[in-house]
Image (spheres, helix red, strand yellow):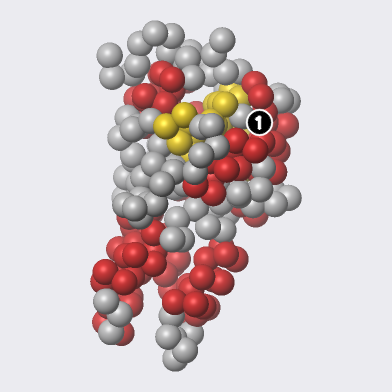
């Protein structure tokens, strides 16, 4: 049976925004003497992190003379400018969501990004009206990889998590979705090449259209077909 609702991560799953975070980090740190390869490798370890966890990791990476909080503020401010100017989508996202909306599907976004920023980014991308619920990282009782975000998103739709399909790119996110009890599909985006996917029993897909096909959203045909 198709899921009763579809729960989506945002950055790296719907929006192709993780690359913007990486590019801004390079632009700020390389003039200060940081190597691009080192910045890129470190950034991959931060994909899917909450804001607080990102700061903790930055404290281990940035040199002692670098003000971590000043860097973090400048980093996120510039990302907001670039995302605001152009919100790129991941492959197959727009047509997939439009097809779900045409079927009357219930949809929600479950993101580590703060709720107000998430709604702003989705609005600029032309996706906001598809979602019944937007649940930001500042609007849940615990952040991913804790199962709370997906449990609380399902509850906001008055559904059990087991009746929902969840879609994530990051390991932290898919851990949250699986442990919440959702039917979970991981659509990997930016990750270290030598890092295996977590063995959580999740399905794995190359893009969102394929992921939706795997959970039965479109019967026996994918969006691409």
Q: Is residue 52 left or right of residue 74?
A: right
Vertical order, 62 against 160 (above or below): below
Residue under numbered circle 1: 181
Residue in the picture at 65% in, 31% down: 181
Which residue sits at x=34%, y=53%? 194
Residue pictured at 33% horizontal, 39% vertical: 90
**Location of residue 50 (image quadrant):** bottom right
Is residue 171 or residue 210 the one in the foreground?
Answer: 171
Q: Is residue 160 above or below residue 115?
A: above
Q: Residue at x 51, y 70 (%)?
A: 57
The answer to whether one can see residue 115 in this image is: no
82 or 58: which is nearer to us? 58
Where is residue 55, by image quadrant? bottom right
In the picture as drawn, the residue positioned furthest to the bottom comes out as 65
Q: Is residue 114 above or below residue 105?
A: below
Instruction: Give neighbour class at mark 1: few <14, some 14-19, many 20+ (Cα, 10 Å).
Output: some
């Amino acid at each position: 049976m198709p899921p009763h609702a579809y729960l989506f991560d945002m950055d790296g799953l719907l929006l192709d925004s993780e690359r913007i975070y990486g590019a801004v980090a390079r632009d700020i740190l390389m003039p200060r003497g940081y190597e691009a390869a080192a910045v890129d490798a470190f950034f991959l370890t931060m994909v899917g992190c909450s804001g607080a966890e990102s700061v903790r990791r930055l404290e281990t990476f940035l040199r002692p003379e670098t003000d971590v909080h000043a860097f973090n503020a400048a980093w996120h401010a510039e990302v907001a400018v670039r995302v605001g100017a152009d919100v790129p989508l991941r492959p197959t996202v727009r047509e997939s969501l439009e097809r779900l909306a045409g079927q009357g599907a219930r949809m929600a976004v479950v993101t580590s990004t703060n709720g107000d920023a998430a709604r702003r980014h989705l609005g600029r991308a032309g996706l906001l009206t598809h979602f019944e619920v937007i649940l930001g990282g500042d609007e849940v009782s615990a952040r991913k990889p804790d199962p709370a975000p997906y449990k609380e998103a399902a509850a906001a739709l008055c559904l059990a998590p087991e009746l929902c399909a969840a879609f994530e790119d990051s390991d932290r996110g898919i851990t949250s979705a699986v442990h919440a009890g959702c039917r979970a599909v991981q659509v990997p985006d930016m990750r270290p090449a030598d890092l295996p996917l977590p063995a959580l029993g999740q399905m794995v897909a190359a893009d969102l259209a394929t992921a939706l096909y795997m959970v039965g959203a479109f019967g026996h045909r994918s969006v691409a077909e």
